[in-house]
Image (cartoon, grey):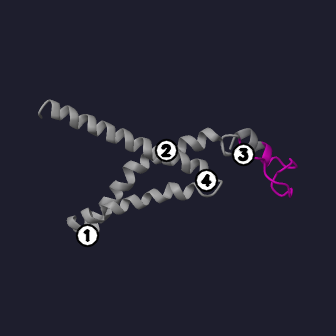
Amino acid sequence: MNASIRAHAEAPGAPGAPGQGESQPQPSWWHRDHPTFSALTGFFTGLAFVAVVPAVFVGLLHLLVDDETTNDLFPLVLLSLMVPLGLMGPAHTRRFGRYMLIGIVVTALVVGGVASLVVWAMMERDL
């Protein structure tokens, strides 16, 4: 909280001060649902989601079961796509969920495109 807001809220007799029975002052504009903040955090959460969730899923499966079972159960990681779809339901998290899904799709497209470009370049050079 900003120092001037905190000092104002804690001043005795100030409107909204504790013990006055009135509500606390509103948080600053950045801490409310600022559209840029929720869009950026949603997008980068989706980006991290693509990298972290499959790695953690495989790591846990590898610790719990053998390699063949891990390979058989890996497609279940696609169920994690239900998280952004579930976030798109409630009105309060809809924007975050939409941008999280956009982050997942864009990251998957970039990774797939770069991988196919590298495979094509390696095939052209006969590596």
Q: Quadrant of the C terminus?
A: top left
Residue pictured at 36% horizontal, 63% vertical: 76
Circles 3 and 2: CB atoms closer than 8 Å: no
Mark linked to residue 27: 3
Q: What residue is pinned by disc 4?
A: 93
Q: Is residue 118 left or right of residue 107?
A: left
In reply to whether residue 11 is colored magenta, the answer given is yes
Quote the CA–CA distance across marks 3 and 2. Answer: 29 Å
Q: Which residue reaches farthest left?
A: 126
Q: What residue is pinned by disc 2?
A: 102
Q: Earlier in the sequence, mark 2 or mark 4?
A: 4
Q: Nearer the viewer, residue 33 or 96?
A: 96
Residue pictured at 32% horizontal, 63% vertical: 60
First to last magenta residue range = 8-28
Q: What residue is pinned by disc 1?
A: 65
Disc 4 residue type (three-letter): Thr
Indicate the secondary structure of the residue bearing disc 1: loop
> Please, is residue 123 above or below residue 94 in the view?
above
Disc number lying in front (3 or 2): 2
